[in-house]
Amino acid sequence: MLKLATEPLRHGTQQWLEAEVKRYVASGDYDSDFAGWPGDNFVDVAQNATRRLRTALVEETIRRVDRIPIRMKMPENLHLWSRTKLSPMVDGLFSADQRSIVLNTLASSIVFLTPHNIASVLADQRWLSTAWDLANLYLTSMGAPVLSQDACHIVGLSEETMCFVSMSYFEEADPFADFVVHEAAHVFHNCKRATVGLNESRRKEYLLDIDYAKRETFAYACEAYSRITSMTTGVRQREEALKRHANGAPPPDDRVDHDEYLDILGEAVRVRNGWQRILKRCAPVKHRRPTERR
């Protein structure tokens, strides 16, 4: 008996639309041109398609965590917690008149994905791909089945100046790891000073000037230094903590020179303001213009 080949679904039909929705929810894939979706013009088509795909994602995410209790204990006031966590780094890197503005910016950029905000966070994402990644990040933290086995198993995700963090953050076992500090450090070179109301100049456009090739080194160094200073008092204890860190696993990033990274931290733990030492080591090299001979 001959098997008849299954005919592909016709674009624009109800069955085809439902199949496209299922494809996106299950894999994160979608046609960015939205060909076949209903609408009067491209903008209308894109809005209709995006709205339907995003709504389906929210509904499926909520369905998968239905009746699953939160496993870990979290701070009641996450905004206050973020300010307290990031305050030492801001105090060490910025002048007194800038600290309040920068700290408010960072604390507002940290968003923990919880049952109370997951629907609104997913609905507010500009990119469908980001929303899908965040849904899987949240599902993992809740111990629920992810949408796809191909989903990245990460603690958080950054998009421009926003940093989305999984509740799994509070279960981190590595004493020298801190995703929140790491991603907040990246905000410094992504956020322009004028955006937060600080004076800006041609040579000082962003919150901090970090060499492009050393951005990950800077973030990892800030992360480790934050943890080291939080668990120690005095130079001797900081040096001992750094030795323990050096004997462990290095930053899992090929963009970071591990020897340079440890050397930067070695300098930082021996001075009063290690944050400034990290910044200095990761700043762009300034080349002097040759003077003209007369």
Image (spheres, helix red, strand yellow):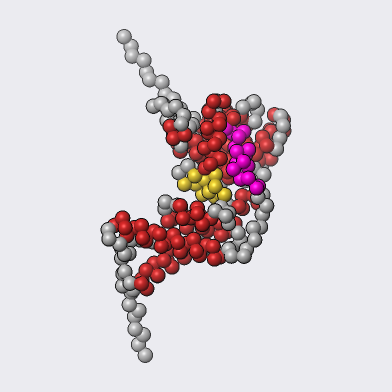
Q: Residue at x 45, y 38 (%)?
A: 190
Q: Furthest-bottom residue in view?
A: 1
**Visible residue check, residue 258:** no
Q: Residue at x 31, y 58 (%)?
A: 44
Name which quarter of the figure residue 265 lies in. top right
Count of labels in the image: 0
Image coordinates of residue 230 in percent, x first then y, are 68, 37
Is 188 rendered above or below residue 145? above
Is 277 rendered above or below residue 257? above
Is 7 rendered above or below residue 206? below
| Pick the front one: 203 or 86 | 86
Does residue 87 show up magenta in the picture? yes
Quadrant in which the N terminus appears: bottom left
Q: Residue at x 62, y 33 (%)?
A: 88
Does residue 212 show up magenta in the picture? no
What are the residue bounds of the magenta stretch? 75-90
**Visible residue check, residue 231:** yes
Q: Furthest-top residue in view?
A: 294
Q: Furthest-left residue in view?
A: 41
Image coordinates of residue 98 in percent, x first then y, are 53, 28
| Prevalent SS, magenta region | helix
Image coordinates of residue 116 in percent, x first then y, are 57, 55
Q: Is residue 240 left or right of residue 186?
A: right
Quadrant in which the C terminus appears: top left
Q: Residue at x 53, y 55 (%)?
A: 118
Name which quarter of the figure residue 96 lies in. top right
Name which quarter of the figure residue 272 lies in. top right
Is 240 rendered above or below residue 117? above
